[in-house]
Image (cartoon, helix red, strand yellow):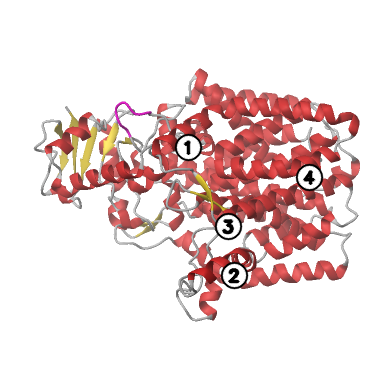
Amino acid sequence: MASPVNAVLCALIATAFWTLLGYALGRHLFPRVLALGAAGVIGWAAHSAVTLPVYDWIGFSPVTVVAIGALCILVSGFSFSLPAPESDAEGALTVPAWAFATAAILALVPAAAILPKFSGDAVQLADPIFDHAKSAMIDAMARLGVPPVNPVFGEFGAPGRLAYYYLWHFSAAEVALTLGASGWEADIGLTWFTAFASLSLMMGLAVWLCKRSAAAIWVVALAAAGSLWVTLDWLVRADDLAPLLWPPVGMGGWLFQAAWVPQHLMAASCAVTTMLLLTRYAQRPSPTLILTLALVIVAGFESSTFVGGVTFAIAGLVAAPILFAATARARRLRFMAGLALGALLVVCLIAPFVLDQWATVKARGGGAPIVVSHYVVFGELLPRTLRRALDVPAYWLIILPIELPAAYIGGAIGLAVALRSALPRPEKLVCAVLACLAGAGLVVSWLLVSTLGDNNDLGLRAIIPAEVVLIVSAAAAVTMGFASIPCRAVIAAIALAGLVLSLPDTAKMIHDDIAGQQRPSGKAFAQSPELWAAVRRYASPAARIANNPLFVKDVTPWPVNISWALLANRSSCFAGLELALAFAPLPPERREAINAQFIRVFAGEGTPEDMREMAAKYGCDAAVLVPTDKAWDHDPFAASPDFRLAETQENRWRIYLRR
């Protein structure tokens, strides 16, 4: 089971290392307050984007990770010996230490959501653990190196590489190797680091824009806001608003996204940092800037194709004319040449990801991976024709105010005020390109739909960079000195009203993340570590395991093989339908057929042909049965010539090995 102590060590090591690297680089690119705020994001992005291909070449092991880490620390020390160009006025700005402390406390909430919660002889998990079944990727990389194998599905003759945006999970594997931690523990530590780095970036940016340290605490407060769904349910005295409004499907504010999808949050932080680097490059071009810019873009894309790829690409196209116009005529050719070189470097580094993902899309079939379709707002209560017509404006007038009550309206007003104000030219240019990023995120969530899974992951995650920008602009607008007092008062009133009205949802979210959900299979899950330790005694690090895809399925809000994902530290030959949706290069019909086949085997209804395929086709080197499997009493493995019994524990488990 994941140890809180090891998770804390992972978080501290990650934060200290990447912040040191990021500040050593950022102090030569940004004013001090921005360099401090963006240090975690820049350090993580530059280091991860560079080391992934390096480890592919020299090997991914504790020795190479520590050696490269030590080299990076030495280079950072040399960087600190060089003078950093910044004006006295900019150098005096800072984010207060107590604001960083407050951000560190808030970042504990998403990290706590991933921790196991012990209740007697059972273990409870919070709902966000569902999306952290991807911890299996961290274990796979720490165990077998990079490029990563596909830990979810194996088939002889099929591509064994993982086609996913896994850079965030790769960086967690680096931390796991350094400390000897499990993938689950590294996931918890990286979730905290990601939340803290995002908050630090927003605080530094808000303070730099308004030139007041008080903006930092507004960032933390606005980031903690929940949605209005709980408040609305209470006001109308209904447990379900679905007849009128389509139920919420996981968009959520910053705190929600930080717990569920830290990899997408980090990609959003990279997108914001990229916009800052672009504006800086338009004014002060340098080779260091263009190299850092390329690496941050690569890191954003390789952590989230939806956020760092689709959303950022649209925002970049919209912002390009603004940046070109802001560049002095004499430097425009150099500006374009530098961007072209940076783009070439980006293409070279992301090419393996793009090719793997494209091959997976083709293997799955089913048409275009992204289609145009507006966000669905209203439920079945309204006639279909009227519903479709009203959905279009309702996204802006209903969904966004409900999901982002503290930041949406106040942040939009703040951006408008900043663009019409007497802000200095660098700050106004930053506001303009950040407005492009926010607009792109909101429009993508409104009009584009990804088709590769059951949820519209593109729409649900593309909004994260918009959330980050709106939180920053609202926090800066409340404290900015150039805005009129009535304007600041209006923005503050709207933000505070949204914050107060969202408190019921915030309180519920924090409680659920810390306490977890009591579910029937909590006791069985608590006993899983011993089961998987026994399996690892017989299964080599490269072995693939077969176990019931529905084992302890009710521990999570949707049925996922969470016990295997968090505790097995071995690859699966088929880890279940939910994980296959994201990771298995299979068309829908075949995916469903394989899922039914594995469920049939562990229900005790497997045929000799099923058993033969598990051994010879899917490469199941080992199989494990537990008493809750119906196959326990009707064991198809015992009768199969393809498997032999390796160990049995009465009323606990049976472990079979492939002959």
Residue located beneath label 4 in the image: 33
Observer-side mark, 1 or 4, equals 1
The disc, 1 or 3, on the residue closer to the chain's N-terminal end is 1
Q: Is residue 27 shown left or right of residue 593?
A: right
Q: Is residue 221 shown left or right of residue 56?
A: right
- Name, please, the residue furthest toward the front: 385
Position in image of residue 511 (x %, y %): 49, 65
Position of the C terminus by quadrant: top left
Q: Which circle marks residue 255 in the picture?
A: 3
Q: Decide: few, some or many residues near mark 2? Use Cα within 10 Å; few <14, some 14-19, many ≥20.
A: some
The disc, 4 or 2, on the residue closer to the chain's N-terminal end is 4
Q: Decide: few, some or many residues near mark 4? Use Cα within 10 Å; few <14, some 14-19, many ≥20.
A: many
Disc 4, SS: helix
Query: For the residues marked 1 and 2, what is the alpha-carbon distance in whole angstroms?
Result: 36 Å
Which three-letter amino acid code belongs to the residue tagged 4?
Val
The disc, 2 or 3, on the residue closer to the chain's N-terminal end is 3
Q: Which circle marks residue 503 in the picture?
A: 2
The disc, 1 or 4, on the residue closer to the chain's N-terminal end is 4
In the picture shown, does residue 155 fall above or below 455?
above
Which three-letter amino acid code belongs to the residue tagged 2?
Leu
Observer-side mark, 1 or 2, equals 1
Q: Which residues are magenta?
A: 154-159
Question: Does the image show residue 17?
Answer: no
The disc, 1 or 2, on the residue closer to the chain's N-terminal end is 1
Position in image of residue 61 (x %, y %): 47, 24
